[in-house]
Image (tube, coloured by chain):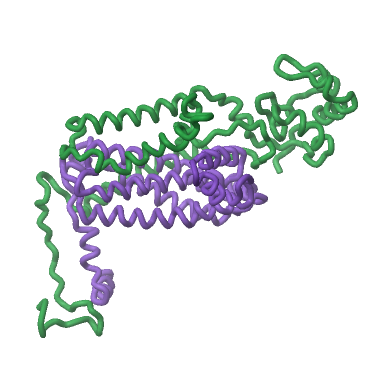
Amino acid sequence: MFNKIYDWIDDRIDINPIWRDIADHEVPEHVNPGYHFSAFVYCFGGLTFFLVVIQILSGMFLTMYYVPDIVNAWHSVYYLQNDVAAGMIVRGMHHWGASLTVVMMFLHTLRVFFTGAYKAPRELNWVVGVLLFAVILGLAFTGYLLPWDMKALFATRVGLDIAESVPFVGEWIKTLLAGDATIIGAQTLTRFFAIHVFFLPAALFILLALHFIMIRKQGISGPL
Amino acid sequence: MKRGKGLTFVGDSRIQKYDKPRLSRDYSEFPGRTEEFWPDFLLKEWMTGAVFLIGFLCLTVAHPAPLERMADPTDTGYVPLPDWYFLFLYQILKYTYASGPFNVIGAVIMPGIAFSALLLAPWLDTNKERHWLKRPIASSMMILAVGLIFYTTWESVAYHDWEQQNQQGQIVFSNLDADDPVFQELVRTNCTSCHGGELTGGSGPELIEKEMSVEHVSAFVTNGSENMPAFEDTLTEEEIQAISEFIANLELTAAE
């Protein structure tokens, strides 16, 4: 049954090579924790991706309740946290998942660095990885404001003040992010929401796709 | 047939019609015991992911995500703190030569150099060796950077007043009437900078839960205390009386 459906699709769009490339590659011994326990360090990248998937899914459910305006934002989060069934779990997953993504990404970066996996011919994938690092920190920064509680507002004010202190373009960056040169308010919240939910995830998906395509194209780096 | 007249297509598309060969890969690119990704290795990854997910869900159940009271931009007494993974950047800005007139060093130049070095690592470290012990300069730079991140994060956490941090943002349901003219004109200008925007505590103690009589509050406002200034000279007796009545009347109420 499934084979027939597969063959029918394959006749039309020739997915066999794509599928074979994803499924039918070898996993060498030196990255397999089944053979060498110390190879668990090679799990960090996969776990970072797993956490990113958790962030995307839990975030999608959060937007079903969240209202990005300063009158209702806090109330919608409070309602989600205390009244919605499993709302506490979904918000908890998104909150702790953010911290863990940063931790796992940090560990993954260190693994790649100390195994020298960023060296030729894998320089471009390292650059994409560092850009992913920046995008994820951007997601963490913009997401922190969204509950619109005290710590969110004042931490964002500090962050925007730091952005403002950049020479020449600082004030421009602050106005772009906050929607106003001085006020952190209604515009700031909607802009951070747009950046957190549309702009940065779009960049994240493109960079992730590049990251994975390059891994498949180049293969994993050999044993030390 | 791959070329020539025998070449046939599916319909009028450009997909070639041919008997698909059963792919049998030669797994000899790497020495040692290699494993097929699908399905053997993926199943193991899946199990690792499942164990990880269980631990992660235990964490979310044991520690609900924090939520402080609603943002109030007028509350000037609140001490800000970024999320923990930005603490090291925040801490750098507290050092003498990275703050004030040197702010641009701590806010832009140092993080900028660190990020650029990370981004350009493959071209800064052109040593052919991959083992970290065989490229001591690159490795020691990274260890130093990680050490500094850990140290500054620790320093930021160790010297922060967590008691005030946890108190100042608490969600408190009280009978405080923010539209009351006494609150608007007197309490906002004299009390909230220390006792918090909703009097739930800041650098000074909270005033909602405390059981205090009007005379008690009035004595504090008039004469001050060890940590609190006296308002005898700045406020009239009527104003002190109004403030005292307002404060003494405060109490907790049930959640909305």
Q: Colour of chain B?
A: green
Q: Residue at x 79, y 23 (%)?
A: B212
Q: Residue at x 83, y 35 (%)?
A: B182
Outermost residue on the top side: it is: B226
Q: Residue at x 19, y 58 (%)?
A: A24
Which quarter of the image is occupied by the N terminus of chain B?
Answer: bottom left
Instruction: Note whether A113 is above or below A217 in the view shown.
Output: above
Count of numbered badges drawn on the protein: 0
Outermost residue on the right side: it is: B238
Instruction: Note whether A217 is above or below B115 in the view shown.
Output: below
- Residue A89 seen: no
Percent position of residue B171, x then y: 65, 37
Which quarter of the image is occupied by the C terminus of chain B?
Answer: top right
Left/right placement of residue B169 relative to residue A95 reads right
Front in this rendered view, residue B86 or A166: A166
User: Quadrant of the rendered structure where residue B126 is?
Assistant: top left
Percent position of residue B57, x then y: 44, 42
Percent position of residue A209, x then y: 33, 57
- Residue A120 seen: yes
Instruction: Note whether A83 is above or below B62 in the view shown.
Output: below
Q: Residue at x 16, y 82 (%)?
A: B8
Left/right placement of residue A63 relative to residue A72 reads left
Left/right placement of residue B78 relative to residue B144 reads right
Give me the chain that's purple.
A
User: Quadrant of the rendered structure where residue B11 is?
Assistant: bottom left
Percent position of residue B162, x then y: 56, 26
